[in-house]
Amino acid sequence: MRATPFEELFRDAYPALLRDAIFAGGNAHEAEDAVSAALEEVFRRWDQIENPRAYARKATISILIKNKERGQQRIRDRIIQRGDYPAGRDTDPGLTVWEEQEWVMQLLESLPPAQREVLACMVDLFPPKEIAELLGKTDAAVRQNLFAARKGLLSYLAATRSGQFRVPGEGR
């Protein structure tokens, strides 16, 4: 029995969508939830969508970001209620792989969504022109977001090295 176009999309795109969601700052569970929700949306709107793969990618990242922002707000609310505030984090050569991954996710979360999205595509080795097409942006907008992401990560790293900690996502 031959697979439907949606089944082919699901089979071919799922691993890349999952990877994109993780690169955009989600853990495995958050990424799976976002990809599933996005693919459900693609299935519901299949006949209305011009480019299902691009739509699925954009929806995955959007859903992931919305879900993470809701979760971060709940965490901030609990921290404020308890009066606990996070201490600065210095890099340590003895960090476990998990801690290093969490630190990278924290770095990515310090970026605005558009910059995270472009950086995730760059990690997937897409050239700026393809990223622009995939995200529905101009080449100039992609280059600007990439430049700003690199600059933001450098300033974030400099601030953490100097002991000036800021909670990712705040102060934008």
Image: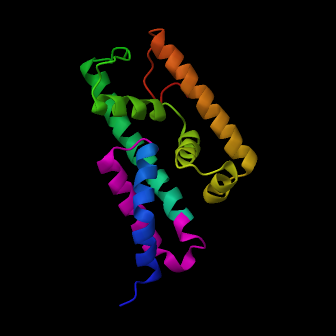
Judge whether 114 appears above or below 167 on screen: below
Question: In the image, is residue 29 part of the stretch drawn in magenta?
Answer: yes
Residue sitting at 70 percent across and 41 percent down? Answer: 143
Q: Quadrant of the N terminus?
A: bottom left
Q: How many marks?
A: 0
Residue furthest toward the bottom? 1
59 or 94: nearer the viewer = 94
Left or right relative to 24: residue 93: left
Q: Hey, which quadrant is residue 165 in on the image?
A: top left
Q: From which residue to which does the magenta span run?
A: 24-53
Question: Where is 116 relative to 7, above or below?
Answer: above
Q: Position of residue 135 (x, y in %)?
A: 61, 55
Report if residue 87 lies within the magenta region: no
Depth order, front residue of 43/8: 8
Most common secondary structure along the magenta stretch: helix
- Whether 98 is drawn above or below 50: the answer is above
**Image location of residue 92, percent across then percent down:** 34, 16
Residue drawn at point x = 38 percent, y = 44 percent? 26
Work out which residue is located at the far top of the displayed protein and give it: 162
Image position, residue 34 (x, y; %): 38, 55
**Residue positioned most to the left:** 82
| Residue at 63% from the left image edge and 53% from the top image edge | 131
Which residue is more in the foreground, 80 or 118? 118
Quadrant in the rendering for residue 50: bottom right
Location of the C terminus by quadrant is top right
The color scheme shown is rainbow
Q: Residue 120: horizontal and vertical position, in percent?
A: 52, 45
